[in-house]
Image (tube, rainbow, N blue to C red):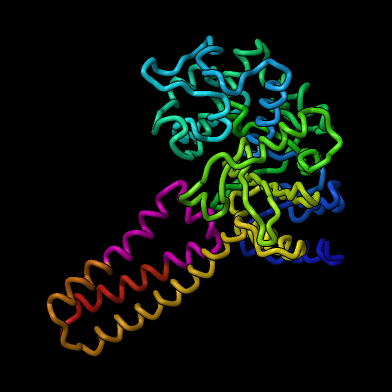
């Protein structure tokens, strides 16, 4: 690890947080299988100006999945869960449709069960009634393919796994995870259950504060933890780590790719194991990782088990993907490898800047052409009018949506991109409608 690396990470965080609109962030570096540096930047609460601290408790969202995978492997190795038996054998409170092909816990862990993503907007106040797990699954379960056919990231699949674990063991999921995984790994403040502990204020894609919430299920995105908790978890996942929760073979199984990801996921990861995204670094080393994006919160954990290198990043904002990508790019360089897959989020920024410049050029060209009153064929007028209308309308439609992928990867540039598109559309509309 380069000696000045932590200093550079601090510089990146301080430089990008204002432009990306991220109030606060915590970073932990791991080297040689142990946390070696942590830094807290920005604010935990913008309204009260409460500073972010390294021991702040976060919603870590989908980093819950690799922790859940450890729990499932622990139960499998102790004979309390069969990863390859149909879940129907254990389920008592809800059952898949009778005509559905058999689904196994292993398929749920690897997102190969053919189950849809699910309703990630199903959030409830901690003080409000929350649907029971079987009731929620009954409403959220949808088969979109045959088990084993392909990768299909599924929050519902992990919620169903939670139900399977409870019905197979007869124990509460949160209590089981605490005793079998969290406590043995020294994750002192981590919990799958809402405790009411003080946390930073989350912020959505528009920078608005987010009230505390819980999901009906916990296995998919319900874990609360500090950056230090996740650093302990990441350290336990290194080759040769001193931990007794799961065997060396079990850990290797969790980290081994079982399916190609493809699509947008394929941009950042080559595959998925059991609860972990997988990729091969430019020097041939294997890396595993997982991130989390929730309403108002983002998280990321990356580790290279062979050498014990890793990083944990937590933010109290949904606008943090580009910031995470910049940090991961620098971390990759400190390891002497090409940027990891998640750093490719920054490609979208470059493409957006080119699109903004192109939009301004088209706007000027269209307005100048209309001002000159140049002769234009009807076909050119028609095409210019149609394209111009689309360029004006899509930013208006997008602005009315609660969430679009472009908002997450371009939180600071999206308004400029929308304005440049509308400007280009106005220029083309002027060409279409202007007199000759």
Q: Which residues are magenta?
A: 389-418
Task: Please tell me in which quadrant of the rendered image residue 383 appears.
Answer: bottom left
Residue plotted at (78% across, 66% down): 8
Q: Position of residue 194 (x, y in %)?
A: 69, 27
Q: Quadrant of the N terminus?
A: bottom right
Q: Position of residue 90 (x, y in %)?
A: 56, 12
User: Residue pushed farthest left?
Assistant: 378
Number of numbered discs overlaid on the protein picture = 0
Say if the magenta span includes residue 123.
no
Q: Pick whichever, 5 or 149, lies toward us.
A: 149
- Which percent across, then down, holds residue 165? 62, 19
- In the image, is residue 381 above or below residue 276? below
- Residue ID at (47%, 33%): 148
* Image quadrant where residue 228 sits: top right
Judge whether residue 412 is colored magenta. yes
Q: Position of residue 276 (x, y in %)?
A: 63, 41
The answer to whether 189 appears left or right of 84 in the picture is right
In the image, residue 90 sits, relative to residue 148, either above or below, namely: above
Q: Compared with residue 32, is residue 154 higher up or lower down, i.e. above or below?
A: above
Quadrant into which the C terminus falls: bottom left
């Amino acid at each position: 690890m380069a000696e000045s690396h932590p200093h550079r990470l601090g510089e990146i965080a301080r430089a990008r947080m204002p432009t990306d609109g991220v109030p606060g962030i915590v970073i932990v570096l791991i080297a040689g299988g142990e946390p070696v540096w942590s830094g807290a930047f920005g604010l935990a609460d913008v309204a009260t100006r409460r500073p972010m601290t390294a021991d702040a408790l976060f919603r870590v969202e989908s980093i819950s999945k690799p922790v859940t995978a450890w729990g499932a492997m622990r139960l499998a190795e102790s004979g309390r869960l069969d990863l390859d038996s149909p879940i129907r054998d254990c389920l008592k409170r809800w059952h898949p449709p009778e005509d559905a092909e058999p689904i196994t816990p292993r398929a749920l862990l690897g997102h190969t069960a053919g189950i849809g993503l699910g309703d990630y907007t199903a959030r409830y106040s901690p003080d409000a009634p929350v649907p029971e797990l079987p009731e929620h699954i009954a409403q959220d379960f949808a088969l979109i393919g045959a088990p084993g056919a392909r990768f299909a990231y599924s929050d519902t699949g992990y919620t169903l796994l939670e139900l399977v674990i409870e019905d197979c063991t007869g124990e509460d999921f949160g209590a089981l995870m605490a005793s079998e995984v969290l406590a043995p790994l020294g994750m002192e403040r981590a919990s799958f259950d809402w405790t009411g502990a003080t946390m930073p204020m989350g912020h959505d894609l528009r920078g608005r504060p987010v009230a505390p919430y819980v999901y009906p299920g916990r296995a998919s995105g319900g874990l609360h933890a500090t950056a230090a908790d996740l650093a302990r978890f990441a350290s336990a996942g290194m080759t040769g780590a001193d931990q007794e929760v799961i065997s060396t073979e079990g850990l290797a199984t969790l980290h081994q790719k079982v399916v190609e990801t493809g699509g947008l996921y394929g941009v950042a990861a080559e595959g998925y194991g059991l609860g972990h995204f997988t990729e091969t670094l430019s020097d041939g080393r294997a890396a595993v990782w997982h991130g989390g994006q929730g309403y108002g919160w983002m998280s990321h954990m990356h580790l290279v088990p062979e050498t014990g290198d890793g990083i944990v990043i937590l933010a109290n904002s949904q606008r943090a993907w580009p910031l995470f990508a910049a940090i991961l790019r620098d971390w990759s360089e400190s390891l002497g490898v090409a940027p990891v897959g998640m750093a490719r989020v920054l490609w979208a920024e470059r493409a957006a800047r080119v699109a903004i410049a192109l939009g301004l050029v088209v706007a000027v060209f269209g307005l100048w052409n209309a001002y000159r009153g140049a002769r234009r064929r009807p076909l050119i007028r028609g095409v210019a009018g149609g394209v111009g209308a689309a360029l004006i309308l899509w930013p208006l439609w997008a602005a009315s949506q609660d969430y679009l992928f472009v908002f997450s990867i371009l939180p600071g540039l999206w308004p400029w991109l929308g304005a440049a598109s509308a400007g280009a559309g106005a220029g083309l509309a002027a060409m279409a409608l202007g007199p000759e």
